[in-house]
Amino acid sequence: MGILDAPFRESRVQRWARRFDGVGSRYPVMASPPTVTMQGNASTINANTAGNVSHRFDNDALTHIGNAVINDGTNRGVGSSITFADSSKQASNSPIRTRFVTDAPAFEAVFRGTQFAAVSAIVDGEYIARARLAVFPNDGNPHYVKFDFGTNTRTYTLAQVSKNAGGSGYAVGDQITLAGGTFSTAAVVTVIQVSSGAISAIEVSNQGAYSVSTTTFTQGSTTGSGTGATFNGPVWSAQFTQRKMRRIELIWHGSGQKLYGINVDNQSTVLPYAVPALAPKIAFVGDSITNGTYLDYAGAHIGLSIGQRLGLADRAEINAIGGSGWATVNTTVTPNGPAWNDAKRVADFIALDADIYVWWGSQNDAAAGSSVVTAAVQSVLSQVSAAVPKAIHIGLGPINVSGTPGTDLSTAVGAGFAAMGNASRFRYIDSTAENWLSGTGKVTGETTTGNKDFYLSSDNAHPDQAGLDYLAYQASVRIADTICQMVGT
């Protein structure tokens, strides 16, 4: 999708705001999930081995959101939407969501084995589990991860049957239970026309359930007194316990993770995953907290949780580099993670082509100086808004996790948003002033003085999973309210 014209982009956000009826829940967990099995270098579905698949990562039926997925040169897909200091394109820890629809009773997702790789899956809007589905060896080899919905059982049902011999003594309305085939429930036909007591027309009134079909039927029993009718030319339909169309979303992340594709049997269909084109796209820009640190499962990212609560999950995307900020480079990684005001990162943000941008950093800019931060905020917003007309921008934070929140950084970021001078397109939510995280404790050192006692992980720098979930809910409420104010709903 290219850069949309401004009126259409604005109307998409307005349409969402008019229909928004409150912050919802995150996706639930499946009551009867598929069995997930980490396999080796060979498929148990077909004869594929060594990373060969029925549908490679670049097959048209597989769509990716969160990062562009390109060939790494060896027929493996790698995320490539986040630009680092050396101009290389990487996925970082931002989630990639590979989506498709299939009727396969079982499928395999094939990934490169690497440390810190994480995979989760959503089936028809429900998580398989809020836990890591597989742990990969750090061997660089392909691994077939099987998702098995269970043994598929076929049941035949009778769609139509013809009268063969009309018999005698029948009346309109008689119901005839058919004999023939192997069934748990026998099919029933109703007499709808007779001629001198002989059947001339029937309709199927109960399709029955058969494990073995047949080509002819006789009368098993009847509600009337007719005898001698026989039936042939049946048309059968089939019902399946596990072969059914399912919307699948694989969520995977990890800086070294790569996708070969998916693998299904040769009777199964794989189709593209349709998304609502008129729903606004929401993009989350941030650092390690937005990127996902110490997640319980892939997909537990704060931005994806917000997207689910706002009804925008199908159009939610995360683009983040840990340790970075509006004016701060992450020099602890190689290659470095550029500051958000770096031209390389600004190009990333423009390429997101979002209708709603949510900017949420933490304390990484604390040493940059207020005037530098304010100028960086204004520079980034000006460039992105010039390239993506009518997109709206919401700033949050900064998230303060360690120690007592200071106000200098929060004020500096807020000043950058205020300098844009258009409250219908730029708003800042000061979560520091609103005291979303309070106290000075952490989960292993509670001080009983605030919610950090159970929302801050023991590293004293990042929220734990409960903290991410809490912040996602807080942000969802405030973002929804702010968007509705901005578009005048």
Image: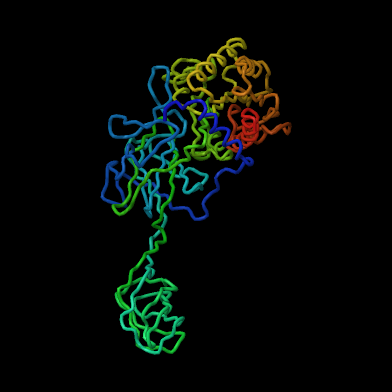
Q: Residue at 43%, 36% (x, y): give it.
A: 117
Q: How is the image coloured?
A: rainbow
Of residues 449 and 232, which is closer to you in this image?
232
Q: Position of residue 151 (x, y in %)?
A: 39, 60
- Rendered position, 44 above or below 216: above
Q: Position of residue 358 (x, y in %)?
A: 56, 27
Of residues 151 and 282, which is closer to you in this image?
282
Q: Is residue 374 left or right of residue 125?
A: right
Q: Position of residue 210 (x, y in %)?
A: 38, 71
Q: Position of residue 76 (x, y in %)?
A: 32, 34
Farthest right residue in view = 449
Q: Quadrant of residue 395?
A: top right
- Rendered position, 177 above or below 423: below
Q: Residue at 68%, 18% (x, y): give it.
A: 407
Residue 444 visible in this rendered orientation of the protein: no
Residue 408 visible in this rendered orientation of the protein: yes
- Rendered position, 226 above or below 44: below
Farthest front residue in view = 195
Which quadrant: the N terminus?
top left
Which quadrant: the C terminus?
top right
Of residues 461 and 102, which is closer to you in this image?
102
Q: How many marks?
A: 0
Of residues 279 and 272, which is closer to you in this image?
279
